[in-house]
Image (cartoon, rainbow, N blue to C red):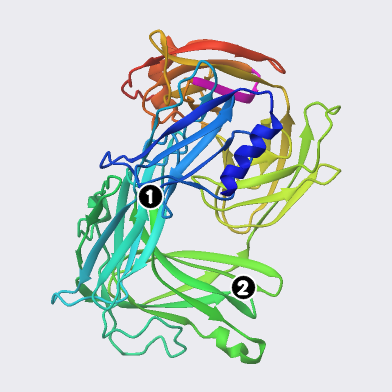
Amino acid sequence: MTRLASCLLLIAAACPAADLYRLAGTVINARTNQPVPHAQVYFHKSDAPYPRAPFISGTDGKFSFDVPEGAYVLQAGTRELIESYGEQGQQNGFSSGVVVGPSQDTSNLVFRWYPPAAIAGRVVDESGEPVEGALVQLIRSHVILGRTIARTFGWAHTNDRGEYRLGPIPGGGQYYLAVTGTPWYEAQNAVLLGSPGDSKPSFAFVPVFYPNTSNAAQAAPIVVAPGEEARADFALIPAAGAKVSVTITGADNLTGTLALTRDGIAGIDSFQKSQNIAFYPALRQQQQRPQLISGIPPGHYVVFLTGKSGNSYLAGRTAIDVNGFDVSVEVPLQPISTLTGTLQLANPAMKTAGTMFVTLNLDGGGASQSASVKPDGTFTFAAVGRGAFRIGVGGMAGFIPKIEVTGADYRDGLLTVTEGETIKAAILFSTETGNLTGFAMNGAKPAPAVLVVLAPAEESRNPSKYRGYQTESDGSFTWNNIPAGDYNVFAVEDTAFEFANVDAVRPYLANAKKITVAAHQSATSQRISVVPILPVTKK
């Protein structure tokens, strides 16, 4: 007996008097429309943990369970990739739950599984010879949770044949590629402690972007459908390189990383070269010598360093232009920024269920960090690196109606941090929230797997004030803990719609349904009609 079968028996045993309903269907490959043989299938109640072991379908991809009434999360796929029911193939953060019950036909579901994609190619030099060790940067731009986000999605180095492969990656969205490398006859990238006036010539490959252009403004995206493998080849052209001589000031006994980044594509910088550095007390003169990075092609760069001296975290950056001649630059170090603040409850009589904490979430996804709120309401982030962050509060359901920030730029819900800043934040937290439930409708029929958008009545550039919900298999949607207030609600079929972009939302507002969410109450049984996608308007 599988663990999943045991879970089913436990569900039934826990509800001996409950009627059971069929949850069954077929996992098919969305690209080929053929069944996925021996698919792994998981399911669990929406408010319960998933089972540790999957149900394995037969060669026909079919699965079948008898379960009590309720809403279920259904997942399926292969060892390589598990997806959730209702995903549209772009991994935009949405899926649909399966609502099982007497009025629902869930006995013949079609689970469309989108196979992963890949991008592969070859990098050669001006003679057509393979470039080994070339660095290929992959940047993905796609709509995630209502916003178009671009970020570095992966890296690859070419092998001795100059070949690389980036995969598995999600299909859909737009991918950009940037390639840089070092000619075989150029010295290896290392910390050199010699004289910056060393007469040894320096050579470099000019960075290129798909489709093999050295101009970042002319870079073009690759769109790879699920299950496809795109081809992207590159030819690198050498140029006279320069040496960058870096003098580091502001710290002793430093360990860290020294790097050069250059202007990239889709707003994302690319690494040109990086190297580790380490200075020790016994070699004090070592730090007084410039650090040399050779083989730098012409371009605009930022030299930046992050490291640690004793118990202090430090960082520094300086912009430079390289035009074929050696460059000397000083990078003064500063302490990494700190953030301290207070969290105040809008209603002092509110009782916390446990420890509350403040979060710093890197805008667009990626690393996040948290700090516990002390009994007196204070919190501390001892080290906050450069970046743009969204501030959140966890440990209690509610929202932030107001934040006051000093010491750094804060606007439209975005905190922008550089080096050497002492940041203070006063956060007001409220539990004046309500709930909103209803159905998206196509005419008289519920519309499953469409996007319902909740937009504030007062227009805002803060994306956190906008919400999206992909409807469940019965067309229903449920929002809990919505800040009390007035809203516009509408529905569209495209789940990749940029609902957190005020310019994209604006055309829908005139015909949207007006809803007021009252604190500690539920606005139920709303019917929202699905409308076609409209052109974006900007102000």
Few, some or many C-alpha atoms within 10 Å of disc 1 (few <14, some 14-19, many ≥20)? few
CA–CA distance between discs 2 and 1?
30 Å
* Residue at image coords 52%, 70%: 331
Label 2, secondary structure: give it.
loop
Residue 261 in the image: state x and y as whole percent.
41, 64
Q: Quadrant of residue 255?
A: bottom right
Q: Where does label 1 land, which residue?
A: 267
Which stretch is magenta? 476-484
* Residue at image coords 59%, 48%: 3
Is 311 on the left or on the right of 463, as rendered?
right
* Residue at image coords 55%, 56%: 386
| Labels 2 and 1: the sequence-earlier one | 2
Q: Nearer the viewer, mark 2 or mark 1?
A: 1
Q: Where does label 2 land, which residue?
A: 250
Q: Nearer the viewer, residue 306 or 435?
A: 435
Is 62 on the left or on the right of 391, as rendered?
left
Q: Nearer the viewer, residue 344 or 129?
A: 129
